[in-house]
Structures are given as C-alpha cells and as structure tokens.
Image (spheres, coloured by chain):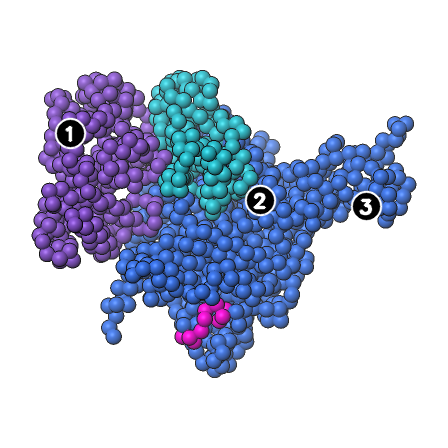
Chain colours: A cyan, B blue, C purple
Amino acid sequence: MEYSITLHVNGEERIVTVRPADTLLYTLRKLGLTGAKPGCLNGDCGACTVNVDGWPMKSCLMLGVEAIGKKVTTIEGLKNSPIQQAFVENFAFQCGYCTPGFIMNCQALIEQHPDADDQTIREWLESNICRCTSYIEIEKAVKSVLQRKE
Amino acid sequence: MDVIGKSVIRKDALDKVTGRAMYTDDYQTVHMLSGKIVISPYGHARIVSIDTQEAWKVPGVRAIIAGKHFPLVGESIRDRPPIAVDKVRYHGEPVALVVADTPAQAKQAADLIQVQYELLPVVNSPTQAFEKNAPLVHERLGEYEKEEDSHPVPGTNIATHIKIRKGNMELGWRESETIVEASFSFAPSDHAAMETRCAIAEIEPDGTVQIMTSSQAPFMVKQLLSDYFNIELGKIIVRTPLVGGAYGGKASVQLEVLAYLASKEVGGRPVKILNTREEDILTSPCHIGLDATVKLGADRQGKLKAAEIIFLWDGGAYSDKAIDVTRAGAVDCTGPYRVDNVWCDSYCMYTNHPYAAPFRGFSHSELSFAIERTMDLLAQKLNMDPLELRYINAIMPGDTTPTRVLLNKSNVGNLQKCIEKVRELIKWDEGAISRVNDRLIRVKGVSCSWKTSTIDANAPSGAILTFNRDGSINLMAGVIEIGTGTKTVLAQILAERLKMDVNKIHVRMEVDTQTTPQHWKTVASRGTFMSGRAVLNAAEDVIVQLKEIASCVLRAPKEDLEIANSRVFLRDDPSIGLDFKDISFGYKYPNGNSVGGQIIGRGHYVLRHISNLDPETGEGRPGPEWTVAAYGVEVEFDLRDYTYQLLTAATVVDCGRVMNQKMAEGQVMGAMSMGLAFASRETFYFDKLGRVLNPQLRTYRPLRYGENPRYLVGFVETPQIDGPYGARGLGEHGVMGMPGALGNALSIAAGVSLHHLPLIPELIWRAKEAANGAPL
Amino acid sequence: MLPFDFDYFKPDTLEEAVELFQYLDHNGKQPMFFSGGTELITLGRIDLAYTEAVIDIKEIADCRVMSLNGGQLLLGSTLTLTEIEETNLFPLLTKTASEIADHTARVKITLGGNICARIFYREAVLPFLLADSQVVIVGPEGKKAVPIHEIFHEQLLLNRGELLVQTITESRFIRAPFFAIKRRQQWETGYPLITVAALKIDEKVRVAVSGLCPFPFRSKEVEIALNSGQSIEARVEAALRVLPRPILDDVEGSADYRLFVFRNILTDALYKLEKERI
Ligand SMILES: Cc1cc2nc3c(=O)[nH]c(=O)nc-3n(C[C@H](O)[C@H](O)[C@H](O)COP(=O)(O)OP(=O)(O)OC[C@H]3O[C@@H](n4cnc5c(N)ncnc54)[C@H](O)[C@@H]3O)c2cc1C
Ligand code: FES
Ligand code: FES
C-alpha cells in the first residue's frame, strides 16, 4: 500500500514513499525533518505545526498525500529569521519541544498579520501548548518582531 | 561577579530554535522495530484470557508478549508486573506488548489482541482505600520484596505509613485558644510534558544493553535494570538526549523496562516504544492525588501551637515513587511555620488509579493547598490578616522542622522577607478585595511554602572538564537538560570560578551513563546545587593542574600565580603568563621538549549528614536545606456566573543566589503557570469503573497562551553557605503556592470555603449551592 | 498515525465524487468523504473511525464557492473555517466558527466537515439553523437544495453517498442583530460547555444551542417561550421548561450546572437583543 510521492518541502522537491494513511508529520519525520514534533497526534498541542501554502498547519492533521502540490515549510526551512532570534533573546523556551511548532505558527502570523493586535496574537497562539514557559516570554518574542516590522 | 546572575543565553538555544535539537523519538534507524502496548480499559479486573492469534497474522509482527511472568518491579516495593498478569489494577495498565516492523503494523496487531476481563470492585479514592473492608488492590502485599524504609501493611491498601510525632500534642491543644479543622481533596492529574515518554532498547551480542530514553534519571534506569534483571552494571549503557519537559514525570522507570523486554524477545534488535498522548496520560505514571485533613491550633496572638495532619496520598495501583512522595509530604507537613507540637500520619494508599510519579514540588504543591487553605480559615476565625498570620508564624533559624532538624541561617531561607516583598508586589495593603462593578470583584489570595529535598543519603554528582587545543573547555556532567537550563548555569559557575568567557565553555547536553560522571537524578531542584558543587570541585582540580605546569614553565611559585581570561599569569605582573591553549595539553619548549600533558579536571560532590527518619517519630535529617517562598494571586471574579480571570500571580522565593536572572524568572513563571493550571483546570475525571474519561489534551487542558495572568517574580537572596555561590533550589517553588493562593482568593471572592481542586466555576457554583441550601 | 490502510481518491467534480462513492461502497470499501479530514485522522487513530477508501472532496470547485449576490450568500462546504473568518461575509458565522477548536486547527477544519461531524457539537451549524438556510445536497439522484430544517435534526440526515455541497443563506439574516457566546468548563480552551447563537429577525428572537444536549438544536418551543412578552426572567424560565432532552451530564459539566449557565446566557442574550430594539 505504499507509493512514492513528491513533496515540495523547504524549497526542495523531495521524493518519499508513504501509505496514504500516513500523516504529513510522519512523512516529514521520515524525511529526516524531525523539527516538527509529535505531541498528541490529535490536533491539540501544536508541536507539529509547519507551514503549508502560507498557513500554519498541524502536520498531524494532514495526510502526506494531501500535501502534494503544496509548498511545505518546516522549522528546518527557516533560516536566521527574526522570530528565531527573538525566541533566543527572550528565553521563550525551556525544554524546546514546543518551540519549532510555536515558531512556525508565530512566523505565519507575522507574515499574514504584520500589524496583529493583542486579540489576533492571542487567537493564533492559543493553538499551541507550551508546558514549560509562562507564555509571557513568547508574547515578548512575538511582539518584538511585530514591532520591528512596523 | 562577572557571569553569575547574568542572563547568559542558553547553551542549547540555537539548536532549539532551528529544529536541530534532538529528543529520543528523533533517533530512528532503519532496522529499529516498533513496540506497542495494549492497555487495560478498566480500573480493576481479572484477566480471564488473552487471545493473540489474529494479531500474529499481521505482517511485520515480530513478537507478542502477554501473560508472561517477569520479575516484579517498583522502586520502594516490588509490587508491579511490567506487563500485567492475572489482573489489571488501573486503566491504562499494560496487558500485552507487540513488536513489529512499523508503528502502524504494531498498532494493527495490538488492536487485534482479544483480552477478556471480569470486573472487580474498584477502589476509586484513597479515602475509600482506607476504609475497613475496602477491596484490596494487592492481595499479597506481605510477600513483596521491599526497601527497609517502606512500611506496607498487609491485608490493607496501605503501601506505607510515615509518622511524625513531635512535641506534646496535649500541651499544644491546651495552649490553643482557636482551633480549625478542615478536609481537602483532589484527584490525580498529569504532568503533560509536551514530549511523550519514549524509550529505545537494544541488546548487543555480548549482552550489553543499550537504552536511549527520555528520562530524568538515566543512572537510575541503569541501576534498576541491573537489579530487576540481574544484568552486570557495566553492561548497561543509558543515553539521554534532550528531554522535552519532565516535571518529575520522567523520574520513574517504566518504558525502559518494557523496551528492554521487547528487545530481548526479538533477539536484541532495537525496539522503540513511544507513548501516544493517551498512553502517556493513562499508562505512564501521573501526578499524585490527595485526601487531607488538617487541624491547626493557635493562641490568642495567632501563634501556632499544634498541628494534626492526615495525608492519604493517592499512590494509585503501584507504589513506586509514591512512597517517597508520602515521606516528603510528612517531612514538611506543617508548611513553613513554626509549630512545636506536630502529629502527622502520612499514608501512601493503593487505589485503582494510574500510579504516581514525582511531580514538580514532590508532594509540596499538593500539601500546601491543604495547609494554606487551613491557614486562611484560621486567620478568618482569629479575625486576623492572613498574611500577617503567616508572617508571625514564619519559620526561622532556631526553630525546628517537623522531623526536628534545628534550622540555622544557612539551611533555611528568610520567609519573613519573602512575605514582605510579596506584600509589596501584589499591593496587599491596598486591600484584598476591590469592586469593579456590580458583578465583578477583584480579590487577592496569599500563601507560603517551603521545601527540602528528600533525597538519598549518598546521592552523588560528578563533573569532568577537558580542554580543546584552543584553550576552551568541555564540561561534562550527569544532570539532564530537561529545560531548566541547568547546564548553562553550570557553564556560568565554571566561567565565574575560572574568570573566563562563558562562550569558551562547551557543555555536553546529552548524558550517557558510560562516559558521563554519575549524577543521582535530575529532580528535586538539586541539579544546580549538587552538580554545581561538583563543577566547582573540578574547577579547583583544573586550577591546580594549570598552575603546576605554569609554575614550572614560568619558574614561579604556584602561590604567585593567578588565573583569568583563559590565562595563567603572575599576580604582580600579568604580562608574564601563559594561555590555556599553550599549557592545557602540556607545554612545548621552543626546542621541542615538552612537559606536562593533557589536563583533565574531575570533581564530585556527595550530600552530607542526610539521615533516615525514625519510623516511630519521624526524627531525622531528610534534606540539606529549606527553600522558602511567599505567593499572591489576584483574580477578577464574576459574582453571578462564578467564572473568573487570573489577573496577577506573584512569587517571591529565597533562592539563595540568582544564577541567571532571566532563566530564574523563567523557571519561576513557568512553574507558576503549571501550578495555576493544576489548581484551576487539570484533573483526571474517573467513572465508576476507575476509567479516566479525559486522556487527551483536548479534554485534559493545560494553560494556553492568553489564559495566563501577569506574572510578578521577586527574589530574596539569603545564601546557603555551602551552595555554589550560595544558590538554593529554585525550579519547583513557583508551583507550590499557587493552589493555596488561588483557593484562598476564590474562597474570599465567592464567600464560601473551597476544599477541592481544580477550581473550575462549576466547583465554586456547587459549593455556593451547598452553602445556600444548607439548613440555617 | 492511522493503523489501517486506505486508497486515496481526489475527484475533480461532484459527479465523480458521487460515482466513486457508489462504486467503492459497492465493493465493500466503506468509503468516506474527506473534507478537512480531521475526523478520520483523529478518530481513526483511536479506532473510532475506519475506511478503506478516502474521497477527498476539498478541492471540488462547487464546494469552494464563496459568494454574496442576489441577496444570497453561498458558502461551499469545503471552505475552511479560517477562510470563512477571514472573509467575514456572515458575522454571526464568523463569531461562532472562530470559537471552534483553535486557529491552526481551523485552517484544516471545514464548514461542511464540522456540520457533518460525528463529534456532536457541530457548532458551525447554529447560524444556519437561525437563518433558515438551505443546503445544497448532491447524491446519486442528483443535486437539490433543501431547507435546513427539513434535513437537519440533531444531525444532517444525508442518505448514503450524498454529500453537502453548499449552504444558501438570505442576506437579511446576515445583517440581523445577533448574539453569540461559547462558554467552556474553564476559560478559552476546549469543547463547549454551552454554545449559544441567537439573532433577532422580524422582532423575534431565535436561539440555537450546542453543548446543552448531545446534539445542536433550535427549538420552536423554546423560541415561543422566549418571545412570549413577559419579563425576561419569566420568559427564560419558561424556555427552560421546554428544553429538549437529555441535558448533557459529562466531564465538561453536570446537567444541573449546564442549566444554571444556560439560564444566565439566555438572559444575557435577551437583554442584548432587546436593547437593540430600543
Ligand atoms: C483540535 C480540535 C478541536 C476541536 N474542537 C471542536 C470544538 O470546539 N467544537 C466542535 O464543534 N468541534 C470541534 N472539533 C471536532 C471537529 O468538529 C471535527 O473534527 C471537524 O469539525 C471535522 O471537520 P473536517 O472538515 O475535518 O471534516 P472531515 O473530517 O472531513 O469530515 C467529518 C465527517 O463529515 C463527513 N463529511 C465531510 N464533508 C462532508 C460533506 N461535504 N458532505 C457530507 N459529509 C461530509 C465526513 O465523511 C466525516 O464523517 C475539534 C477538532 C479538532 C481537531
Ligand atoms: S502533534 Fe499535532 S497538534 Fe499535537
Ligand atoms: S519549552 Fe517546553 S513545552 Fe515549551
């Protein structure tokens, strides 16, 4: 039941064998892109968040085959972005497990709503759980980048 | 101080924001097999039959383990079959284990295993477990192997009983003019680390057992595997990469045992077991529940005179670490107050619930709710300001703890200072209650806590330092990077001691039990203390060696040498000296002759003067020092709906010394967040069959972005004289006062005394209804 | 991770989708329409959903329609909830949808998927119940538009092989004053304790509810009570007496507590919507 598909990931064409039942998360990890993490496989925690066609996407809620023809970006595809730097400077992580997912969500937010207000930030960032930090650090990180963009 | 106290960027930062940071499940090889656990759907049931026939037909299945007797496991009492036989004792307990080529195949096969059960009566709370004639969770409790300081009572559900008997209770009650008594309870809950637990095991042809695991205690994994299965210690190698949150939950040893058994069953091939979220919540050990009764007496001035406390801990189906939690709870049972007459019975109860692991605070987050709520009830009855009541009773040097340790300026922090500071932070003097409009009020609640770390009397820690050719240093220590940033702090400690640039210190994040010096366990806020001492010790060792060779080359006595900026130089003429890079691998004279050799620093530390508790009175020294803290929480409460928002949460902790400002704040704020979630939303909901009804993050809900309050953090620095640069434990304290402070705020707000967690609006509504409906 | 295997089909047209379904059904494949797909993915992994053939309909053009013309709002069934929120053509729907799951999940969850979901909250249906919308259904017998009240009773009563294509809503409902609230067990995360959507049209208040019973509903009896002209308190009490049963009693909240909460929400809804009359 496995077959080969081509995915567009982080600007590269990647060929990978999947079962149609494999999630995008599983597929990406099979490609060695282990930045997106399994936390619940149920759409609840956001640790698996990647970017699909400009939108944040819980990669556990998408099949690998659904991503055919779409542009997928994972944390590994983010290079020296301001939000990564802001996470470092603001100590916006501890164990770091939620961090790739959080950053991918933040990055999509910053791209789509460079002028996001508190309400919008909250609505977006509610999608991820961080069990270590108090969220204040993450709030500071996001806002520091949003301000820089202004 | 150049480096200590500074917000040095975490050493793991870059890896963690780029997705390069590796956790256990990120390690995958082609020939790695996948293990899948079949779990019990019931709380208590006899296993009538297990049929694996259909499961074997699934392609890729390599092994199925079910119904086999293995040695019993468990830390204090060997009461747990790694895979259930004859009966299951909790919802989620492993009843079979499938090994297959892929996770999908393993799951397919696991689904096809037919297990027939016959339901047994369920023990659904520790209070029920304590009743005479309660169903027994363990019929053969008397036959288990156990450690000396566990005291199970065969024929009951009592796994251990710790007694504290201090002073003279009769006298205490006689001196008490005001007495309050109240009961509190809450069900078990979960750590909910974002990384679910994962273990990989492989057995090499020569018998070497390779384990990789998301654990806080790899050295314990090694020890226990050796004990359980009679494997030579040197043939067990446990590796722990970065850990995605732990909070105590990864100090228990469970999946490692299953992975080992699985690998053994398939001829040693590597087998990975990754918990699903549901398994992580149900099958792996949880956050302990508690039923408590607290009776406090005070004289006219409000000075505490007597305390009688009963703790019934919900240890769950197997005692494991709950025995230690029960003891730790007894040791600090009164909270951070001077009480000369104390009577405490702390029982670890078996129930048909998931069994307990340590949880951040190790019994203190739990017992503090009971104690601090009772303190507020006492203040109310005395008509006293609750913060003032705490202030005048605050524990101090010269007082003794419940286990009669005499406190001094070093081994206890300054609680009164913490209280003063929190009073300012939350603007307590502006009043505890203010009205926003006819429906909303703002209300503050306060609490305090203390904690010592009950750890093994001979718990070791060690550190090794090696040099690179450029003079930079590699630091190896056995603490696990679970997110607390301890390894960065260790680098700071070393940099401070050697007066060098912290960027020239490289820390190894991964731990393996073969090449990393042993560190007891990364728990109990002891990482910085013990490992820090070991690092300082190693630094001394390096200094001696550096000076030795420099004194030879520079032809100067060692006493005249100084070390700073990666150089050894003459104190009176710093221009004469040698860089680390020129001597750390021996010194080479211009003519090619060399002296000295590679410098390797070693350091160690063992806690001293820890002693066992007297089984009759509890007397003994359970831990090295007591960290104290004071807390405040402010909520905005809706008088009609009983809903509320968290506005502010504050913690002031006497941490001895702030090692890294931002990281310390982060630890305390993160802990507060967890404490508030525990206090306000997180719990397991059980049905009559002992099933947990909410084993997913959809229904078991940690705090989310935006639900959090504003956080205020303050530090008091009363150095612990033998701590590294005076530092005390810090990682747990933010949690501990939150349930009490929130409970106090909401009790004031709602005008009804609240005795249960989590403090959801429905609970408050129910308490109000009960109070309103009560006959006058 | 789904343990079972299935074939994945992605038809381009409604006809193809319907035909495929029949064909696969005939061959015992237990086919399943897949829109956002979150139901299969999340319930399949815990053995609560199964199929051997997935028919992904989310890019079929008819299901992607989003248009407001001729006084009618057409919304395709495979629009994601975030798409609906971002364009905000139907503010009550925006408000209701934006409380479902979380923002990232709503990038995947679709309108039709939520209305047809097995998880019984189906909050996105509430605005359509209030607006007497029509639903466009396609099946082996072809395409038809049906008033939602004829076909939605607790759930959308589709025949096997039928699928929801669009909803049609008259624009006067879109402009009507409304009230929407989702109350949870605690704060902003999780399933509803109770979700209420209400709007006022022709001087009458309409109310649709999810989370009170194990199905979403709009009840004639409740609305008669609420519009009966006495004091707000009396009307709310009258409405509570004619609620459908059973009242949910689960980990989110007990039945008693739900009624307590519902009473307050109804009161608030009436106050808000009546004030707008003045
Ligand atoms: C993290 C998370 C949180 C959630 N929280 C909530 C919540 O708060 N409130 C709530 O109401 N729900 C909630 N849900 C559940 C959610 O309702 C369903 O998973 C979701 O609505 C299904 O939408 P979908 O687009 O993914 O549909 P799918 O999974 O594609 O489909 C759902 C069902 O409908 C059928 N179907 C889909 N489209 C059509 C169509 N056009 N015609 C006929 N049948 C069709 C499918 O065959 C399937 O049986 C949550 C889900 C997640 C993942
Ligand atoms: S793993 Fe995808 S949301 Fe949790
Ligand atoms: S940093 Fe650990 S979960 Fe966010």
Mark 2: secondary structure: loop
Say which residue label 3 marks: B562
What is the x, y in percent for residue B73?
A: 49, 48
Residue type at mark 3?
Glu
Q: Does the beta carbon at disc 3 come under 8 Å from ligand 3?
A: no
Q: Around disc 2, counting alpha carbons within 10 Å, would you say few (fewer than 14), some (14 to 19), or many (20 or more)? A: many
- Res A64 → quadrant: top left
**Residue type pointed to by label 2:** Gly
Do the residues marked 3 and 1 share a common chain?
A: no
Residue A47 tag number:
none
- Residue B503, percent across and down? 67, 38
Q: Are discs 3 and 1 less than 8 Å apart at CB?
A: no
Q: Residue at x 16, y 50 (%)?
A: C278
The tally of labels here is 3
Asked if disc 2 is less than 8 Å from ligand 3, the answer is no
Q: Chain of mark 1?
A: C
Residue receiving disc 2:
B485
Residue placed farthest to the front in the image? C278
| Sequence order check, earlier mark of 3 and 2 | 2
Membership of B50 in magenta stretch: no
Pinpoint residue A24: horizontal percent, then vertical percent: 39, 27
The overriding secondary structure of the stretch rendered in magenta is helix
